[in-house]
Structure formats: C-alpha cells, structure tokens
Image: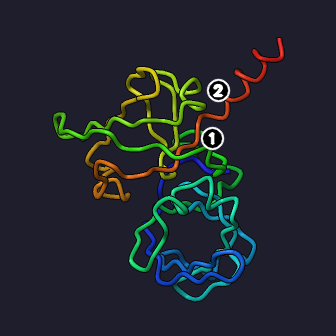
Amino acid sequence: MFTGIITDIGTVSSVEIRGDMRARVVCHYEMSGVDLGASISCDGVCLTVVDKGPDWFDVDISAETLSKTNIGANGWAAGKRLNLERALKVGDELGGHIVSGHVDGVATIEEMHTEGDSTRITFRAPDALARFIAPKGSVALNGTSLTVNEVAGATFGINVIPHTQEVTTWGNAKTGDAVNLEIDTLARYVARLAEAG
C-alpha cells in the first residue's frame, strides 16, 4: 500500500526484454534499507525489487502490467523519469489517500493551462473507469495522489500546485501524455456493492 505522496524521482537507466521486461531504476533511496522483494511504486505501478545496488534497483514487468499501464503505451527507455514511493509502513503519516499501486487504466492529458501559480490539467479517462471518478474525490495519477476538481463525462480536471511540480515529474507533463490512472479504492467498492444490490 502507498499514499500517493511521491518521495523521490528515479530515472530508468536500462531496459531489457527477457520474457518479462526488466528495468533498472537509479534513485536517491538508501538502498541498504530496502529489502529484495520490497514493493516500490514506479509512476504508480507497484513493482517488486528483484535486485539492487547502492543507488539503483531492478524490477521485472510482466506482459499484463505492460498492457494495463503507460509502460506499454509509452515504453520505458533509458532517461525516463519516474515518480517513486516506497511502501507504507504501519505508523507512517497518511498524507494522500490509500493507493494500492494496481493501475486501473491509462488516462490521456487533453489540455493544460496556467491557473494562478498552478497548472490546470484536463484528462480523458477510459470510458469504463469514468464513472468511478467524482468531483472532490481522489485519484492517483502516475502514482501521485491528486484531488479531482470537476468531471464531465469521461473527462476530469485537477490542479497541480508548484510544490508538486517541483518534487514530481508533473513539471514535465505535456498534452498527449499517457498517464497511469488508479481510481479511489473506496469508489471501486461502493460501485461493486451498488451492483450487487
């Protein structure tokens, strides 16, 4: 489990196809404190550390994950910057919202403009996920916990404040980008309960 509060920006240093895809991510984490088998959210995708060094870790990415995330849509290559978050520990501050790292689909940035000091971004969600997104609700976008401002059909808007742009990859976002979308877990369960009657 994660909170959607990004704690580092990593950089993909290499990618190798060996059945699954293996990627090496360079980071600022003290890797001596990260166990093999630990989970790290990489742009919102919960991935398992399978090897590590003093300032890097390797993850394996399955075909299923490639098909459901922007890793497959955009392709990871050397130099790709990633929002990183280590797994939540009991007793940690929950500053964002509960995020599983299980990406539901890929949204697309449709429009961006400056609004005060912030950047207003409009996204198009996959039709099947749009009903789970509510005004003033939470979503995780590329692993970042963000508040939804408004919803119109399959589009929704958020504001990214300057601090978030500085400490995440959102400062480099552009129109047309494919973004990992995880809907709020609570919304998923409420919808399922409603379907069940």
Whether residue 127 sits left or right of residue 115 in the image: it is right
Q: Which residue occupies the foreground of this view, 169 or 108?
A: 108
Question: In this view of the protein, which residue sits in the foreground, 19 or 34?
Answer: 19
Toward the bottom, the furthest residue is 53
The quarter holding residue 52 reads: bottom right
- Which picture quadrant has residue 34? bottom right
Numbered badge on residue 98? 1
Q: Which comes sooner in the sequence, label 1 or label 2?
A: 1
Horizontal relation, residue 103 to residue 180: left or right: right
Q: Secondary structure at mark 2?
A: helix
Q: At 19% across and 34% down in the image, what residue appears?
A: 115
Q: Which mark is residue 195?
A: none
At label 2, the amino acid type is Ala
- Label 1: few (<14), some (14–19) or many (≥20) C-alpha neighbours in 10 Å: some
Image vertical order of residue 169 relative to residue 37, above or below: above
- Measured from the top left, where is residue 59 in percent x and y? 64, 75
The vertical placement of 131 against 94, above or below, is: above
164 in relation to 186, above or below: below
Residue at which label 2 appears: 187
Front tag of 1 and 2: 2
Q: Which residue is situated farthest in the top direction here?
A: 197
Query: What kind of residue is marked 1?
Result: Ile
